[in-house]
Amino acid sequence: MAKPVVAIVGRPNVGKSTLFNKLIGSRLSIVDDTPGVTRDRIYGDCEWLNHNFLLVDTGGIEPYSTDVILSQMRTQAEIAIETADVIILVTDLKCGVVASDMEVASMLQKSNKPIVLCVNKCDSIGAPDPEFYEFYNLGLGDPIAVSSVHGHGTGDLLDEVVKFFPEQEEEEVEDEEIINVAVIGKPNVGKSSLINRISGTDRAIVSNIAGTTRDTTDTYIENKYGKFNFIDTAGLRRKSRVNDSIEKYSIIRARMAVERANVCVIMIDATEGFTEQDSKVAGIAIEQGKACIIAVNKWDAVEKDGNTMKEFREKLSVDFSFMSYAPFIFISAKTGIRIDKLYEMIVHVHSQNSMRISTGKLNEVLGIATARVQPPTDKGKRLKIYYMTQASTRPPTFVFFVNNSELFHFSYQRYLENQIREIFGLDGTPVRFIVRERN
Ligand code: GDP
Ligand code: GDP
């Protein structure tokens, strides 16, 4: 089950991003720590009363070509309606109710999505100012007084929000054999073309899962390679009203799909090469610890000589050095070239992401590796790694017990990661290290 999505909408300057930052806190994510990957701060994980959800700041999603506030707000509202389970409309106590608040409120109301009305900048504690009651006129029920700067009222706000979350359904019995695949990439790389090709050639079942307030349309495929569920990146088929050229919106859709996936096919456009947007998409997969394949699509449209693929591969290895574990495949959704191979790769990286390595074998490799390259020292003190073990899978996560975690530098961790990968493969999957001190 995907996490619920909560979107924040409202006029410029009412305090949307202040609220967003307050609710998200300032936790550093894995991606912030990965050189070469960029990230938009338009969504973040949030937790309240044992509910986990994804918070989206639609204010951060700027349509390309419009600076007219009203049309911008319309786009924001559309994005919220398309993606969110609950929408927070933020207004400003100091400005009172203005015409565009009314406009957006009525748009949101028509969507039948649950809406929570936040009156921001209620900085004083105690009885609300008389102006506060004006916000009842928006017809969205009880407004909640919040000060995003100080944090007052954010708890009341979240109490209201989580009330609207769909009931935690019984966890569906997962068929372990089915591999959930998310095809992600910037607009126009060919994601829907790939899904269409796949569903045209194999027995495909398009399933409507209406379990949540958000309908998704997945494509289920069974063939000689296995059972696959290609996750709808929301609106793949039913072209959304929201203009696809809004890149950041596509990032949110990708984020929602990746969460449900076992394997991510990161699609890039061979005719364009690597772009910053591709690194953002890849960052989502890294953050979620998913197995990955980099699929270079539109390979049919590239003029080739005997060296072209090799040259592409070398160039892309540099561009994607932040996920050097991910294999490349050169495909064409149009002609179908190497789609068979893509299935094989999906099965392979999925098995690698699920790999479990015995403690005995791990420590054998650790022993050899630390004998070959001595652990680092600092001020006469040497790192000692007593022992390692695998704590979990998907992604493979290893715990190291050491004398002093500060001595366990990134470069030595990288060395050990490479040694482990050399022996065990772990193709296409990130790995995680947890370092514990023990005396
Ligand atoms: P956005 O355009 O809706 O994302 O608004 P911002 O979050 O950028 O905030 C706009 C301005 O309002 C900034 O100067 C904030 O410091 C200020 N602001 C945001 N929240 C509050 C609040 O709770 N109280 C007060 N007094 N100012 C706030
Ligand atoms: P999406 O936005 O990622 O879903 O991209 P689409 O599947 O809508 O494709 C965008 C455009 O690229 C369309 O005009 C497709 O016909 C074209 N396209 C997709 N895959 C290929 C391919 O493998 N080769 C070529 N030459 N064009 C492709």
Image (tube, grey):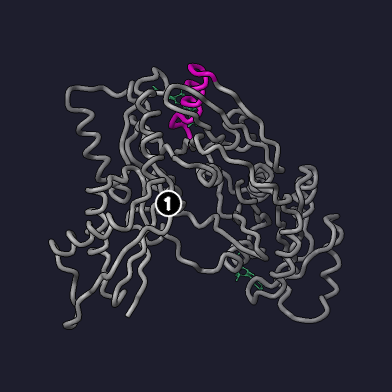
Q: Amino acid at mark 1?
A: Thr
Q: Is residue 249 visible?
A: no
Q: Is residue 126 magenta?
A: no
Q: Quadrant of residue 417?
A: bottom left
- Identified at 54% across, 35% down, the residue is 231
Q: Quadrant of residue 54?
A: bottom right
Query: Which stretch appears magenta?
Result: 187-203
Horizontally, residue 348 falls left or right of residue 175, namely: left
Picture layout, residue 326 above or below residue 36: above
The chief SS type of the magenta part is helix
- Quarter the C terminus occupies: bottom left
- Identified at 57% across, 64% down, the residue is 24
Q: Is residue 60 visible?
A: yes
Q: Is residue 188 magenta?
A: yes
Regarding mark 1 in the picture, which secondary structure is present there? loop
Closer-to-camera residue (392/155): 392
- Identified at 32% across, 31% down, the residue is 329
Residue 98, percent from left and from top: 77, 58
* Quadrant of ligand 2 in image: top left
How many numbered discs, if any? 1
User: Disc 1 marks which residue?
Assistant: 393
Picture layout, residue 245 above or below residue 91: above
Residue 67, percent from left and from top: 59, 49
Q: Decide: few, some or many residues near mark 1? Use Cα within 10 Å; few <14, some 14-19, many ≥20.
A: some
Closer-to-camera residue (418/87): 418
Residue 143, percent from left and from top: 80, 64
